[in-house]
Amino acid sequence: MRRPTRRLLSGVSSLSQVVACHSNRALCLHKLGDARGCEASAAAALALDSAHVKARWWRVHGRLARGDTQGAAEDVWVLLQALPQHREARALLEATCVPSTPPVSSL
């Protein structure tokens, strides 16, 4: 299925708006059950702004839906470095039984 990304971003003028569009698209694709598209859109946002918390959160969900618990765990640890009190991320970490210590790559 061809995705109209260029058309979607045609009226966007700033980098932060492009990042927000990719992140919001990841949310929409997550809600539609498109895990691969969700992860790809979130990754596109993170490629432009690696500190974008919402994009990272949607990439976690996309990765989990695809069964990539290791990748999701790495993203959760990065997210928790930015927002240590993020309750949903902590709960997700506990619920998925991923390692309780961060991977070396996220330190």
Image: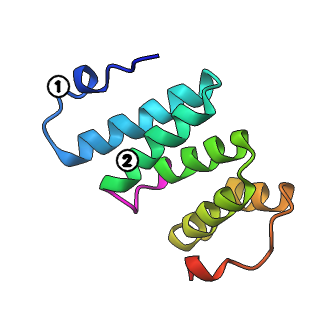
- Quadrant housing residue 71: bottom right
25 on left or right of 5? right
Any mark on residue 97, and which? none
Check residue 50 for magenta coloring.
yes
Q: Nearer the viewer, residue 20 or 104?
A: 104
Would you say the magenta stretch is mainly helix, strand or loop? loop
Identify the amino acid type marked 2: Ala
Residue 95 vs 19, above or below: the answer is: below
Where is mark 1, residue-wise?
Answer: 10
Residue positioned 63% across, 62% down in the render: 76
Q: Quadrant of the C terminus?
A: bottom right
Q: What is the C-alpha distance between the residues marked 2 and 1?
A: 16 Å
Label 2 element class: helix
Residue 94 is situated, as x and y percent measured from the top left of the image, at: 83, 62
Q: Residue at x 23, y 20 (%)?
A: 7
The residue at 78%/57% (across/down) is: 91
Q: Is residue 68 left or right of residue 11?
A: right
Crowding near the residue tagged with mark 1, few <14, some 14–19, many ≥20 C-alpha atoms within 10 Å: few
Q: Secondary structure at mark 1?
A: loop
**Residue 61 % position (x, y):** 65, 43
Residue, disc 2 = 45
**Residue 13 appears left or right of 35:** left
Span colored in magenta: 49-54
Amino acid at pointer 1? Ser
Q: Residue furthest top?
A: 1
Q: Nearer the viewer, residue 72 or 2?
A: 2
Determine if the magenta segment contains residue 26.
no
Q: State whether residue 88 is above or below residue 20.
A: below
Name the colouring of the figure.
rainbow
Q: Residues within 10 Å of mark 2 (few under 14, many from 20)?
A: many
